[in-house]
Structure formats: structure tokens, C-alpha cells
């Protein structure tokens, strides 16, 4: 487990490794140390002010994406008509936003079970603390994208 910097760089490396050449123009507008609704609002507004033709926002977390949804609504953007917004966590709360938030479901990907299994193996001596766990997040398609 690591702090925000670890996850930020890990998610960003994964993104850069998997996007195709046509998507290479995507940009990171706002990197912050606090994942919150407010940073989502601020990041969305900064993005749209600098790049008004933006048609898709992929937020670092569901909370930031919910902030972006809020800013989009208050600023007159139709989601998903004008801009699509995607989170990254899989929070159940995302299903309650208007429109419901599309997200990359990390929480429902078996992460907690994999970590629990690894801790048990470390405690009983059948695994090393340096052993890695890999899970595959799945898209949870809702109406925001």
C-alpha cells in the first residue's frame, strides 16, 4: 500500500502504457494531494477553461469525478452530451449522482480479498512481504459516459 503519490504514478503509468496513438493527446491538467469533490470541481473548471473542446474527463477518483459532474451541471454542460465523465474506484455512491457515474471498478475487482489473502500468507510464513498482488479493474458503465 502506498500514499497518493504511489497510486497517482501507478495509475498514470498504466494509462500511458495502454492508450493508443490516437489518444496520446490526452492531458493531465490537475494533479493534487487531496482527492475530494472540491478538487474535482477545480480540475474540471481549469480543464474546460484551458481546453473548451474537451469531450471526456477521466478523474483519478470517483470523488473527483463527482466534483467534476457537479461543476459540469452548474456550468451548463450536458453529461454525457457535451462531455463524458469517468471516475476511478467503483464507489456505490457513484450510482446516486445525476447522471450516475461511470467508473473503473477497483473496489469490486477482488482487491480486498487479494490483500487479505496476502496478509494471511505473510503472517503464516507462506509468502514474503514483497510479494505483489495484481487485480484487474472492470468498467462499471453508467450514464455519465
Image (tube, rainbow, N blue to C red):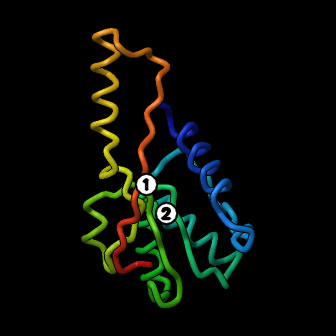
Marks 2 and 1: in contact by CB < 8 Å? yes
Location of the C terminus (image quadrant): bottom left
Residue 114 location, quadrant = top left
Residue 88 location, quadrant = bottom left
Q: Position of residue 26 (x, y in %)?
A: 69, 68
In this view, 134 is above or below 142: above
Location of the N terminus (image quadrant): top left
User: Residue tagged by mark 1?
Assistant: 36
Q: Residue at x 26, y 62 (%)?
A: 93
Give the class, few, some or many, for how many residues have Cα within 10 Å of label 1's Cα (few <14, many ≥20): some
* Alpha carbon separation for disc pair 1 and 2: 6 Å
User: Residue tagged by mark 2?
Assistant: 40
Give the class, few, some or many, for how many residues have Cα within 10 Å of label 2's Cα (few <14, many ≥20): many
Q: Position of residue 83 (x, y in %)?
A: 53, 83
Residue 112 location, quadrant = top left
Q: Residue at x 46, y 69 (%)?
A: 86
Q: Position of residue 111 (x, y in %)?
A: 34, 41
Q: Position of residue 28 (x, y in %)?
A: 66, 60
Residue extending farthest to the top is 125
Amino acid at each position: 500500500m502506498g500514499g497518493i503519490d504511489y497510486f497517482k504514478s501507478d495509475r498514470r503509468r498504466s494509462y500511458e502504457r495502454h492508450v493508443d496513438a490516437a489518444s496520446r493527446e490526452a492531458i493531465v491538467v490537475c494533479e493534487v494531494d487531496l482527492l475530494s469533490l472540491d478538487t474535482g470541481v477545480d480540475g474540471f473548471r481549469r480543464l474546460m477553461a484551458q481546453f473548451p473542446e474537451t469531450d471526456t474527463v477521466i478523474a483519478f477518483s470517483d470523488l473527483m469525478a463527482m466534483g467534476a459532474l457537479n461543476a459540469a451541471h452548474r456550468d451548463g454542460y450536458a453529461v454525457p452530451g457535451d462531455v463524458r465523465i469517468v471516475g476511478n474506484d467503483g464507489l456505490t455512491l457513484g450510482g446516486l449522482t445525476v447522471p450516475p457515474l461511470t467508473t473503473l471498478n477497483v473496489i469490486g475487482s477482488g482487491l480486498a480479498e487479494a490483500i487479505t489473502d496476502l496478509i494471511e500468507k505473510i503472517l503464516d510464513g507462506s509468502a514474503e512481504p514483497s510479494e505483489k498482488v495484481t487485480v484487474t479493474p472492470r468498467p462499471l458503465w453508467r450514464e455519465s459516459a
